[in-house]
Amino acid sequence: MAKPTPPPKLLDRLRIAIRLKNYSIRTEQAYVAWAERYIRFHKLRHPQEMGAPEIEAFLAHLAVECNVAASTQNQALCALLFLYKHVLDQELPAKINVLWAKKPERLPTVLTREEVWQTIDQLSGVHHLMATLRYGTGMRLMECIRLRVKDVDFGQNLILIRDAKGDKDRITLLPESTQEPLQKQLVWAKTLHDHDLAQGYGMVFLPDALERKYPNANKEWGWQYVFPADKYSVDPRSNIARRHHHHENSLQKRVKQATQNSGITKHVTCHTFRHSFATHLLEDGYDIRTVQELLGHKDVSTTQIYTHVLNRGGLSVRSPADRRR
């Protein structure tokens, strides 16, 4: 007689619940890591035996002893709330008393137009194109990396960004200066895809169970990534070897090196291109609501931070030191 299959372990149940909600692989990895860290902090006690007091103690530990950022602490809380609600079926108190880490109010780093091109011109090939797209469209890093062929519309000069932050779609502009290099990139990607198909591969990851609904769509050209990886990798969820998108660390490292080579002393990351995109549009006189839509901000107050880093401020204030009798 066959032995009954043991029930999945807690962290496996957490993974299953996250996948049923169609959360990203990054969210899954982060939530599982926080659940494991929470359990180890309380000497391997099962979360079923714990509740709000233990959560509060763990979050206070993160804030006081680990000195984590407020956003990190908030992610840990979200992970634990998900664990209790969707895995353990426990209703926690409406309010959990948390000693929040102080969230600093910082202005974003913005490059001048000259500094932007000094940095981009230090890049070459696909990294030059991706950096130019990031500055010319305001896309987030992963939005650029995950761009699909079908979402680039050369006829209307636009890019459709799907499943962006907050699980929303939006439209941004396609810079004219990127059209020719982008076309060349697609020719190269198509050649790579045709080669993969000939080798029995060519399947790409599809979101939201589309792979089950449209079993052949994962091989279609339109669903392929604009910036495919150089080699195959194993999908951590399906264990299928296939070509994924370009790894984001590659662009991040290249931008950091390009900044150093340019002699720019500002703290520049890939996200700085997005900040510069927004600020330069406002400098050019575009309406803040238009910039908000292009960036995909839920609230215009998020976009308003860029008015504080304009050359002359949000109210076009001129310093009295610049006026002499």
Image (cartoon, rainbow, N blue to C red):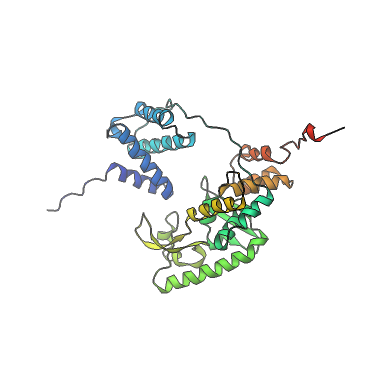
- Residue 305 located left or right of residue 67: right
Quadrant where the image shows the C terminus = top right
The residue lying toward the viewer, choosing from 161 and 183, is 183
Is 26 or 323 nearer to us in this picture? Answer: 323
Which quadrant holds residue 79? top left
Q: How many marks?
A: 0
In the rendered view, tell whether residue 124 sits above or below residue 101.
below
Q: Which residue lies furthest to the bottom in this view?
A: 198
Residue at 39% x, 46% y: name it. Answer: 29
Give residue 227's position: percent from left, percent from top: 51, 61
Q: In this view, does 94 lie above or below 270?
A: above
Residue 59 visible here? yes
Which residue extends farthest right? 325
| Residue at x-position 34% and y-position 43% | 14
Left or right? Give the position of 94 relative to 316.
left
Query: Measuring 52% from the left and 60% from the top, which residue is drawn there?
Result: 148
Is 156 left or right of 81, judged from the image as shown? right
Tell me if I can see residue 156 in this picture. no
Question: Residue 66: horizontal and vertical position, in percent?
Answer: 41, 32
Q: In this view, does 191 lie above or below 226?
A: below
Q: Within the image, what quadrant is residue 236 found in?
A: bottom left
65 shown above or below 169: above
On the image, the x and y values in percent for residue 107 come to 61, 37
- Residue 231 position, x and y percent, is 43, 64
Q: Residue placed at 71% from the left, 37% from the top?
A: 314
